[in-house]
Amino acid sequence: MEGVMKNYFSKSKDEILKEFNSNEKGLTTGQVETSIEKYGYNQLNEEKKLSTFTVFISQFKDFLVIILIIASIISLISGNEESTIVILVVIIINAILGTVQHLKAEESISSLKSLSAPKSKVLRDGEKVEILSKYLVPGDIVFIEAGDLVPADGRIIESFSLLVNESSLTGESESVEKTSDIMADGELALGDQKNMVFSGSLVSYGRGIVIVTSTGMKTELGKIASLLEATKEKSTPLQVSLDNFGKKLSIGIIILCIIVFAINVFHGVKMLDSLMFAVALAVAAIPEALSSIVTIVLALGTQKLSKENAIIKNLKSVESLGCVSVICSDKTGTLTQNKMTVKQVYINNKVYNEKGMNIQDTGESLILKESILCNDATSEIGDPTEIALINLSEINYNMNSKELKEILVFQKSHLIQTENL
């Protein structure tokens, strides 16, 4: 069973193949069908999303909002239509803003799925075929190469200069050199498991052959998704304060209205007139603008954060974030983009900015060409430093220039020849 044998990094190739009833020719179609029934598809489970209408309705559950709804009804009964319209408009705007923020947050969380590879090259019935990654199962033998996203967790059985970027899991910006060697038994951190690859990682160089050991929610990426699903929503300090204030205010208004109603009746005022006066007092005492003011202030804060690519799921969380004094965060992929950029170049006792080089100058042109040719990367795949050098040349050359295209073609052909050696 998946997960029974742990520490796959300390097991041999034959032990793992035996564990999953596989062999060097891969799984058979029958075995795959059985495994899919047993383990499920290789995809992240997505918690059933609430419909937009349900999210919209849930915005009216706030205690202060309920008070405002009651106030609008009372205003309507007492003939104050203008007050009713104003209150309802404020409530609806508040609900719309909350719904929009909730939907934006759900989109950002579901983007975790983009780390899953869409297709994989796998050995099935002794033949190398390309399939949708969702059909991978433990025991499959998968081929990975530079540019691929690792489709599932697996044990490397063959490595050819394999480098894998695992920054999405470990935070380490440098690609990890992988091996097929057996590692010592015991507990090892993900970053130290050199003979394992993990779902969502990017193969930056070389190629390898991998036995799948975990799929779907059993992968390390799946564990992250499980934590996101298991997170329970808690009331923010602002929600707690507003709820307490709303309850106390409601009780105070009700008691005051009863007292005023009783005094009027005691002094001989008609019952209906006394009731209408008490209702008018209740409407006047309820702070209709409080909810709208709070919502507008929080919405402004949310918009400022969204411009900085920080999405807030709940408007009231803005206030909680404002109370934070210390944030502990890993830098790679969080504070940085895990990318390197050339900012200045030193040539012939002169310093040039990255966009200020002259390709007509012999020295400057030579260093730009060397940046491409003594380099194993492309503009998107490879070592971060080498990618930065490729981008430096592309910035200074015209992207459509014949000379740049010739240099890139020569570099790519050299890479292909090198990998075939």
Image (cartoon, rainbow, N blue to C red):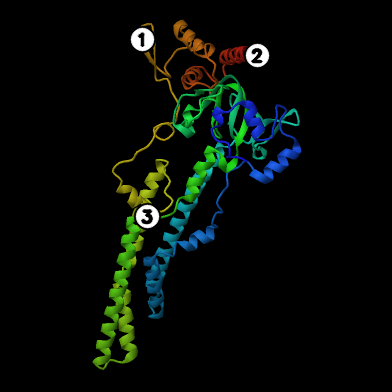
Residue 371 percent coordinates (x, y): 49, 13
Q: Is residue 323 above or below residue 166?
A: below
* Number of other residues with Cα within 10 Å of mark 1, as a class: few under 14, some 14 to 19, many 20 or more: few
Residue 29 percent coordinates (x, y): 75, 37
* Left or right, 133 with reference to 29: left
Amino acid found under the numbered disc labelled 3: Lys
- Say which element carries label 2: loop
Q: Quadrant of the N terminus?
A: top right
Q: Say which label, 1 or 2, has the lower sequence index.
A: 1
Q: Residue at x 65, y 40 (%)?
A: 134
Residue tagged 1 = 350
Q: Nearer the viewer, mark 3 or mark 2?
A: 2
Q: Nearer the viewer, mark 1 or mark 2?
A: 2
Residue tagged 3 = 316
Question: Mark 3 near mark 2, Cβ–Cβ under 8 Å?
Answer: no
* Left or right, 97 with reference to 211: left
Task: Work out how far the residue at label 1 is from the one at label 3, CA to CA, in angstroms.
Answer: 54 Å
Residue tagged 2 = 420
Task: Work out how far the residue at label 1 is from the one at label 2, CA to CA, in angstroms.
Answer: 40 Å
* Number of other residues with Cα within 10 Å of mark 2, as a class: few under 14, some 14 to 19, many 20 or more: few
Q: Nearer the viewer, mark 1 or mark 3?
A: 3
Amino acid found under the numbered disc labelled 1: Lys
Amino acid found under the numbered disc labelled 2: Asn
